[in-house]
Amino acid sequence: MPPPPLAGLRGGAAQAAPAPPPPQPFAQAASQAPPGSTRAMILQAGAALRLRDEQLRARVQYYNAELKTNAELDAITDQVVAELRALASAQAGTRPQGEVEIELIQNLRELLEKLFSKKRSGFLTRKLEEVQRRITQLFFNSELYARLAEDGRELPAATWPEQALYFALKQHEIDILAELESMPVSEPAVRDRAIEKLQSFQRQLCNEFLSKTTPELERLLAIYREVLTHFFLEVFPKNLGEFCWEVVRESRVAHDHDLGYKITAEKFHGFRAVFDRKFLEHLVLNVQEPITRRASQSTEQFRDATLLFVQDPRIHTEICGAINDALYDYLHGEGYLDLPPDWRRLLMR
């Protein structure tokens, strides 16, 4: 059963529109490739992977900074780990690498086939609801900031008067605030109140024009929901043999490793890097074209800004984050994948 639409979307524009910094413009190389071409999709997958790696580096560093450890306990732990590694090294090579590799591939494939089975649609339903929330946030941020990026582009025609006024205010916001700061006032509270009124008016304009985009966003989310459901239940399972073979072989997790049922923590980062890359390649090559085609050929026409948004590689980055983080947690729970402490802490959050 396909996942349900995003609950409570209509009328929730104000709550769903956070205010991070403006997004960076797309990579120039991707923009030069013909839209829909294999090269363009490979470039898009590469851009999404780079964004994914940047997000992970920031998140893991953040969680590492929170860790508080006991020096004596750390010393004992390090000693135990060193002894276990020495024991593993002494036993390494007792099994042929090819044999271990085949076993790792088979076990990974069986676990993923079980998870993406139609009998276990609850996992996919929950994850696609999370994907929709992430796309919603990207969409509203794109509406707010994409045209204001400092990349030399001209602002396209605004669709609504509230949108035009909001963009005009945002473009001159720094100058207006500077004028208010330098303007003589009878008391500081007057200036503070003026700034509050400006910000309140901006939020009002923002909410008014974002609410106008909600019906279009709901139609776009329906396209993503249907295409992604088909991909994860019909397309991806058929390619799992090739996918698992590529991941295990290219990540070299079977090198100096005798366990065919488990990937140990020190090999996780190499495994994760290849898993994410191969996942994004399969994802982009199989979903980008049908999503773009369905949006372009929709009976209810999408705005040019929305069709441009569909090409944003950050969408695939968010899909990868929502799905793959859950996959690593699942593989860890099944005993197939040991996770480093920083990743266990990250996934628990």
Image (cartoon, rainbow, N blue to C red):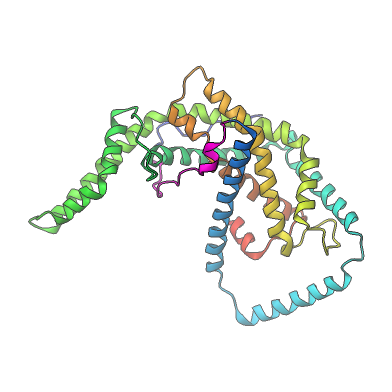
The residues colored magenta run 14-35
**Res 280 quadrant in image:** top right
Residue extending furthest toward the left: 186
Picture residue at 43% right of the left edge, 39% below the top: 142
Picture residue at 77% right of the left edge, 40% below the top: 240
Foreground: 55 or 198?
55
Decide if residue 188 is on the left or right side of residue 2: left
Please provide percent x and percent y for residue 150: 37, 46
* Vertical arrangement, residue 294 with respect to residue 122, above or below: above
Viewport quadrant of the N terminus:
top right
* Vertical arrangement, residue 308 with respect to residue 252, above or below: above
Please provide percent x and percent y for residue 262: 80, 58
Please provide percent x and percent y for residue 129: 57, 38
**Res 297 quadrant in image:** top right
Foreground: 71 or 274?
274
Picture residue at 41% right of the left edge, 49% below the top: 20
Please provide percent x and percent y for residue 213: 41, 30
